[in-house]
Image (cartoon, grey):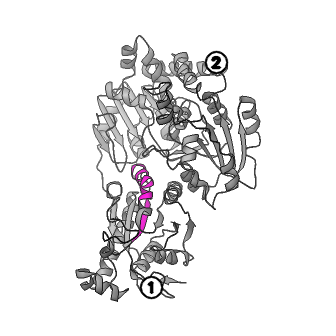
Amino acid sequence: MMYSDIPSAQTLVLHFKSRGIRNIVISPGSRNAPLTLGFTKYPFFKCFSIVDERCAAFFALGMAQQLQEPVAVVCTSGSALLNYYPAVAEAFYSDIPLIVVSADRPSYRIDIGDGQTIRQENVLEKHVGYSANLKQDVSHAAASVSKWGGERSKENQEDIQAYNEATIGKALQTALFEKSPVHINIPFEEPLYGTVSEPTIPIPADKQRMELEKVQMDWDRFASVWKTSKRKMVLVGVNQPNIMERGVLEALAQDGNTLVFTETTSNLHHPDFFPSIDSIIAPIEKSADRETLFQDLQPDLLITFGGLIVSKKIKAFLRKYQPKIHWHVDPKKAFDTFFCLSEHLKVDPNTFFKAILPDESTLGAYKTKWLNVKNGYEEKRKVYLNQIPFTDFTVFDEVLRGIPKGYQVHLANSSTIRYTQLFPMHPSLKVFCNRGTSGIDGSTSTAVGASIFAEEPTLLITGDLSFFYDSNALWNANIRPDFRIILINNSGGGIFRILPGNEDTGEFSTFFETHHGHTAEHLAKMYGFSYQKVDDEAQLKNGLTGFYDASGSPKILEVSTPRLLNDKILLGYFDFIS
């Protein structure tokens, strides 16, 4: 075994080991050499090398998302750290325990014109649960510290060690028990590559535990409100697969006064749930009786749980037609998304619903009415699909129906996640999307990271802008041969054609839609992916045949769709079902 001879580096590595934090994603650099040596020379750790720090952070986020445990990213000093920020923000809003470890230069080398230095302390503080700024060791490179360190050089090494251990401990406890990203910044003075064969820092066993907040719940009150509310809506955001108990889902489905609105990322399924929210609301928006219909849909009681919601239409509806009561059920936090939050219930959703749901099933006009609406749009969608040309709409229908059971499916943001809401997906599929910040910047990297420890194969469905933006994600030696990418290439940001402001001008094409003529063919060849491109429905059906078969390399299936027709077909769908 080999350890860095720098006390703070050694301390961090040993603290990670004592708390079982095993997976470390490292981007090459010199200033982080003490950490790289410590992690890579210790058999306990599993280390991954990712050159691009932005990709590295999303790769680690994908692993942490799947494992539901902290994963660390380690980088050198300077702008390398800033490239972690998009993934840190995603982790913050999605409650993913990403641990950022940044090597830094000594404080006396900051802002004096030295190379590769920025103000790294607290640079991520707005989007992490805790920032740990370690103190520089005075026992290492003592001559340099004494000459340049000023007042800091007079500190006692034992005090520094005690402080560093405490702040590292707090950071790791925050990641472990609050499921929040944290930042640990460590200044190192040269020399950086010294090692010792035995640890010189004794680290005690981890005996610290965060006390969980004890919540007193007035279950009788909640059960009474539930029982007396005639129109109840349960709106579910992002959820881990299989997190909700089947008995709870059945009880919710049997309540005739309750509409359960889900999304693709909710990972909840029942024939009596409502999985395509926009297919309910969009026709009402177009109706001459919209006011009456929206009032008919308006709930008395709204209960939300899970992460962030995709549908803009449900947000707009609930902000205007607010419920009398809105409860959000989550042990950690509650967003007032609809500006009418009544109460944050800090319990697990399974615990909550089991405590308030009655045993008997009920019948109610509220649910019956909207189930009829749901059945109607589902039948009309089938008719519509049989009469439209090959476009994004038909591609998503074909692709989603063809995914093998049990797959892990990652969705890029923008058009991809929104199209997917319109179609059913098999209940065995485990669906993920970076909805914390809804950015396109790390979809591929996240999917690759999530695939590493998954028992099942992984499919990424992505649009062209998201794919090309994160193309360095393919620069990764850890991609499994059963990893699959379906790239739907409509030659630009197609979603902007369905948003207000669409116009056929050069400025729109350049600055909003970002029209391009790129394909993934050469990227696939460079990174060792099998590649096939299709341009029509027959080719797509043929391309999907054998696409999921076992292979010696990962695969990309690129589907080219008509840029100028996609938005018309999508908007036409909502007209057709209205």
> What residue is shown at x 55% (from left), y 50% (from top)?
470
> What residue is shown at x 56% (from left), y 69% (from top)?
47
Residue linked to disc 2: 383
Instruction: Please state the extent of the stretch shown in magenta in the rendering.
Output: 82-104
> What residue is shown at x 64% (from left), y 20% (from top)?
388
Is 123 in the magenta?
Answer: no
Mark 1 secondary-structure assignment: loop
> What residue is shown at x 47% (from left), y 26% (from top)?
502
Mark 2 or mark 1: which comes first in sequence?
Answer: 1
Relative to 407, say whether 59 is above or below: below
Q: Amino acid at mark 2?
A: Val
Relative to 377, say whether 422 is above or below: below
Q: Quadrant of residue 205?
A: bottom left
Of residues 316 and 37, which is closer to you in this image?
A: 37
Q: Is residue 301 visible?
A: yes
Q: Please state the horizontal and vertical placement of residue 386, each as a whole percent of the image.
A: 67, 20
Mark 2 secondary-structure assignment: helix
Q: How far separated are the C-alphas under marks 2 and 1?
A: 70 Å
Is 83 in the magenta?
Answer: yes
Packing grade of label 1 (10 A; few <14, some 14-19, many >=20) is many
Residue linked to disc 1: 5
Of residues 37 and 145, which is closer to you in this image?
A: 145
Q: Amino acid at mark 1?
A: Asp
Contact between marks 2 and 1 (CB within 8 A): the answer is: no
